[in-house]
Image (cartoon, grey):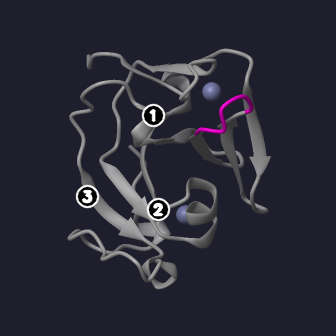
Amino acid sequence: MSKATHGSCLCGSTAYEVSGNLRPVCVCHCTQCRKSSGHYVAATQCMMTDLKIHGESLIWFKSSDIAERGFCGTCGSNLFWRRAGADHMSIFSGTIDGETGLSIASQLNVESKGDYYTLPDVPVISQDMLVPI
Ligand SMILES: [Zn+2]
Ligand SMILES: [Zn+2]
């Protein structure tokens, strides 16, 4: 049994708790992640059934035909990404409180990276190679 992971948005009005395992972090350089985060996204993932979300400020934005992004309607922090119908939730790693015990293990969509940074030194994978949890 792993210890619970806690996280929140910047203003604290949306908080969450994960009771199960977290996947190693994957970086996504796609245009949607870059626009919504202001840089690239570094996300871990948990089983939906292990996640409890607290607070009233979370808003879901349908960012594509297949996915939604969860952000705080008060402070604007990006917290979650979920694929329609999926049994797991992506959690943006910077919203986790304290030490995560995680590290960046892979990256996606490098063809749309920004020209102002270099890629992390981790394997490039495709979406279908990303194994949940
Ligand atoms: Zn907030
Ligand atoms: Zn992305």
- Front-most of residues 75 and 88: 75
Please state which amino acid type lies under the numbered disc 3: Ala
The x and y percentages for residue 75 are 66, 32
Q: Quadrant of the N terminus?
A: top left
Which element type, helix, strand or loop, lies under badge 2? Answer: loop
User: CA–CA distance between discs 2 and 3?
Assistant: 15 Å
Which element type, helix, strand or loop, lies under badge 3? Answer: strand
Check residue 6 for magenta coloring: no
The answer to which of marks 2 and 3 sits earlier in the sequence is: 2
Q: Is residue 26 above or below residue 129?
A: above
Q: Say which residue label 3 marks.
A: 105
The x and y percentages for residue 94 are 41, 40
Kindly indicate whether the residue at mark 2 contacts the one at mark 1 (C-beta within 8 angstroms).
no
The answer to which of marks 1 and 3 sits earlier in the sequence is: 1
Q: Which mark is residue 95?
A: 1
**Are there few (<14), some (14-19), or many (20+) residues within 10 Å of tag 2?**
some
Q: Which mark is residue 40?
A: 2
Please state which amino acid type lies under the numbered disc 1: Thr
Q: Which mark is residue 73?
A: none
Check residue 76 for magenta coloring: yes
**Are there few (<14), some (14-19), or many (20+) residues within 10 Å of tag 1?**
some
Which element type, helix, strand or loop, lies under badge 1? Answer: helix
User: Quick check: is the Cβ at mark 2 less than 8 Å away from ligand 2?
Assistant: yes
Which contiguous range is marked in magenta?
A: 73-77
Q: Residue at x 29, y 25 (%)?
A: 98
